[in-house]
Amino acid sequence: MRPELFLRWAGFVLAVAVLAVPFIGSPSLADLTFRTCTLAIIAISWNMMAGAGLISLGHSGFWGVGSYVAILCANHFGIPFLPSLLFGMLGGAMIGAGLALITGRLRGIYFAVATLAMSEGLRVMAVMLPDLTGGAQGAYLDSALFPGALAVNIAAGCGAVLAACFSWYVSRTRYHYAFRAMRANERASQMLGIHPMLYRVSIVIVSGAMASYAGAVSVWYGGYLDPGVAFNLHITLMAQIAPILGGIYTLAGPILGTLAAAGLGEVTRQWLGHVEGVSLLVFGMTLAICVLYLPKGIQGGIDRLFRSVVKAPLADDSTPTRTTR
Amino acid sequence: MSELLSLSNIRAGYGESVVLQDLSLVVREGEMVCLIGANGAGKTTTTRVLTGLLKPWGGQVAFAGTPIDKVAAHHRVELGVSLAPEGRQVFPNLTVDENLLLGSYSRRARPQRKRTLADVYELFPILASRRMQKAGLMSGGEQQMLAIARALMARPKLLVLDEPSLGLAPKIIVDVYRAIVQTAEQGVSILFVEQNVRAALSIAHRGYVLANGRIAFAGSAAELRNSKLVQESFLAPRRTHQGSAPIKAAPIGTQREGGFA
Amino acid sequence: MNLLPQFLIDSILLGGLYTLMAIGFALAFGVTRIINFAHGEFIMLGAYAAFWLFTGWGLDPLVVMPAVIVLGFACGWLLFKAFIERVLAAPNINQILLTFAIGLVIQHIAVILWSGDSRSTTPEYALKALTIGDAFIPYGRLVGCGVAVLLVAMLIAWLKWTEDGRAVRAVAQNSDAATLMGINVKGIYALSFALSSALGVATGVVVSFIITVTPFMGFPMLVKAVAIVIVAGMGSIVGMVVGAFVLAFAETGFAYYVTEGSGWAEGVAFVLITAILIIRPYGLFGDAEA
């Protein structure tokens, strides 16, 4: 069977499994699946931005915005579950638009630093506006509106599947080539008739909305939110590790990486979960090892295995922006 | 005259693009040799291979009879090769003086730094008057002088110049070329690459024409000047009325045997 | 009571500290063009070193500083040679992620070894203060600022007047031309990175008696250092000093003159970063890069 076909079938089976687990799986399996799904969403979201040459160090900002918008909708306006998710996405989209417009044409390091400033700035705001957000004490989601664990799990699963389908769809359109061109050289891409600002804003909006969705669903799952939880650096870290582990810029990469990272997380938790700081240490080392020795991640390993490069459309050898002097 | 520099069958380029297919040239002691070619022909690629900034895919670079392919770029200046790079590439936020001090960073040059500095300021009085100025604020011509002076601070046996006339007004080109000739008279061998063929041939002993990644023609300056290739490709056809000839660097000197003004 | 003298004193003392914090970071960034996201962790390591030597052997932080600096230099050098050197030519994203990961690893090794509890060194002078009129000058901060200024001055002198210092400046401006001078650029990178780490560690020693020491103290300081470098722009030491004092004054100003300002003060760095990126991305004193 051709590798591409195999991958499609594997994806389909995975999607079915993910959607089935909330119905037929044990609570602990459902919990693991939930966390894996939200991770998959932000991994795909991060990977999409990276594919356009935009490195985000502030993905926790989008997640946090989604969480806070959702909890505000519920607590202050009595908005139920599903609509609050949409509002969450809207919040993420607006932050994304703001970020893209403010950073203008900045690339590489400067863009990355801007995303960091954004997410940390949002965190400070969350702490300093207790009337709105509950401040550092945090807030509890109004349990009267809770739609039931099943609904929340399904929402996460659907979100993950939809995110994957969306990224697959984008990879098939000409937008994919526009983003690749932007990643390599934004100025040159302009000469190809690609309007960088338009593409940049749209990718950040979409990416932000996705990540915010994950954050919004999470707050319904967890029922509690404070700035530390919402804007946790851990989120940004995992959003990066999963795509890199799986194979950055590729289609299946974020998903493969999410599975690997979730597995790694579970193993670490079982063995050494009682020691504080171990899991992040392990993930940090994983990230370093991937950057140094496995730049193409798991997908790269699979490609080598199959010889013929799996033509997952986002996969390529082109080198992204590098520092020149 | 012994062979000072020899490039043999150099094959080099960037990424997937081959710039030099099969380049061979020689510079002997005491000579002034020019390498002329059109924009993009590979002149700068050649100087980068020579100085070790670019690793060639094939061929050999030898200096004073010894192959130096394995010698790292930052060690080549110790051997006696010094480059005034394309675009001058002075250190913009450092003063003229500091730029020159850096020129004599190498172990070879450092002990004689004071004397070399004095010599260089004498050769380029305009630099002496701008000693404490930030190099980035100087004019193109001044920066070119600085680049050459800085290269000379390394006390080289072979001075390589990459397009010394680029972007300079004709009068400044005259000054720069005069300095080059004076340097040669001190015993420094010179290899310079140029687009400005008239200027180059006005001071060089010999020359090579680089085209399509190879040497298309080689010979004495006179031979080059009279060759069909050079005449058609580089020297614009003369117009019917006089006085409209392109840049003439001739005042410095025509052939070496005639001396110079 | 007039707050102004106190405000000025606090701002100036803080500015001195911030200059030290930023200059170490800026050195590595300016020369290698790599943002060292682990710089905060070097500060943290310096602070812990001072803490353990103080608690264990009763040694004053200022006394141990030279030794700790040398250790920091060596660690920085090793780190560079082992890992960072490999990504010098790699895409931005690899560099960013690697130093990010290294910072994370160091941070969590510290958490595992030393727990997340707050610590602090308390040498004699840190507990005393001068009073001049309305103003109250804590000795700890005064000494800290003094040491910081001294170290910064030493660095600037080294850069300006020594052979290697000049080589470092040359490499920062044009690494190819530097190679042509006979400078071993890779060696200069390692030297700069090691110096940067040494300065980071020194910053940690200095702040060990001024702020609380935890494994997580590094990150906020990194963000401030980044803010300062971005405000200043690359390539200007003067700009950096200005940037450090701008940040110090802004933060202190918030703390003094805005209600609940000390909470918001943490956000000042981010606002500055955003503002500069909008108005003048290359910094107030920087040269525009291609």
Image: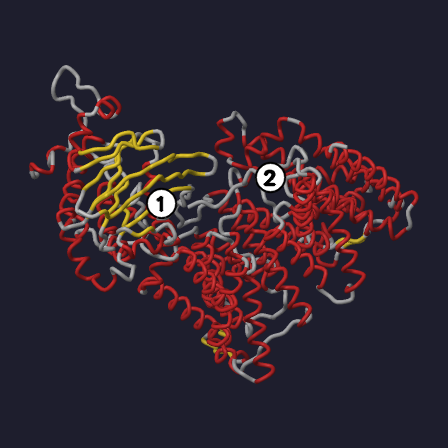
Instruction: Return the x and y of residue B152 as percentages of the image width and height.
Output: 22, 52
Disc count in the image?
2
As displayed, is residue A223 above or below residue C162? above
Q: Secondary structure at mark 2?
A: helix
Residues under numbered marks 1 and 2 in contact, where contact means CB atoms less than 8 Å apart = no
Which of the two marks, 1 or 2, is nearer to us in this view? 1
Above or below A4: residue C197: below
Residue sitting farthest toward the bottom: C58
Q: Residue at x 62, y 29 (%)?
A: A175
- Report the chain holding disc 2: A
Task: Please give the residue where the numbered disc 1 appears in the rendered image.
Answer: B60
Q: Is residue C243 visible?
A: yes
| Residue B128 place in picture, x, y as percent | 17, 53
Mark 2 closeness class: few <14, some 14–19, many ≥20 residues within 10 Å: some
Q: Quadrant of the N terminus of chain A?
A: top right
- As drawn, the label of residue A98 is 2
Which one is in front, B213 or A310?
B213
Label 1, residues with CA under 10 Å away: few <14, some 14-19, many ≥20: many
**In the foreground, B260 or C124:** B260
Q: Residue A38 location, x and y as percent?
A: 76, 45
Discs 1 and 2 lie in a common subunit? no
- Where residue C69 sits in the image (x, y, percent)? 48, 72
Look at the picture and state if A188 lies above or below C270.
above
Quick one: which residue is furthest to the top in this view?
B240
Tell me which amino acid carries mark 2: Gly
Q: Using residue B157 as the reference point, say whether residue C228 is left or right of it.
A: right
Kindly report the distance in space between the C-alpha atoms of the residues bearing marks 1 and 2.
56 Å
Above or below, C199 against A220 in this view is below
